[in-house]
Amino acid sequence: MEFRDWYELLRIQLKREEGQTMAEYGLLIALIAVLLIGTLVLFKGALVNTFTSVTNSL
């Protein structure tokens, strides 16, 4: 293979986007998980009170 062939192969590989899409989905899932955990921690007291109230009502 000549240098030009290697260069062309490298250029084609760098243009591929399949891996980028998976990485973006992974980042979105991680962000949603962090936000969900943060919300649960923030409203922990209210959630405990609500579940305690429901349990006592039963």
Image: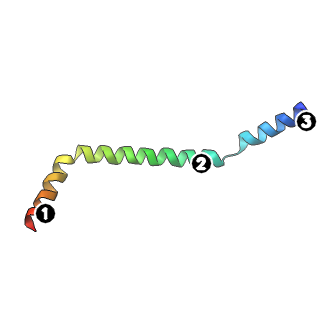
How many numbered discs, if any? 3
Q: Which residue is mark 2?
A: 21
Instruction: Give the mark toward the camera: 2 or 3.
Output: 3
Element assignment for label 2:
helix
Instruction: Give the mark toward the camera: 1 or 2.
Output: 1
The image position of residue 52, as x and y in percent, is: 12, 57
The Cα–Cα distance between marks 2 and 3, rounded to whole angstroms, is 31 Å
In the rendered view, tell whether residue 52 sits above or below residue 36.
Answer: below
Element assignment for label 1:
helix
Q: Quadrant of the C terminus?
A: bottom left
Q: Which amino acid type corresponds to the residue marked 1 in the rendered image? A: Val
The image position of residue 35, as x and y in percent, is: 35, 45
In the rendered view, tell whether residue 56 sits above or below residue 46.
Answer: below
Using the image, tell me which numbered label, if any, was put on residue 1.
3
Q: Is residue 38 left or right of residue 2?
A: left
CB under 8 Å between discs 1 and 2: no
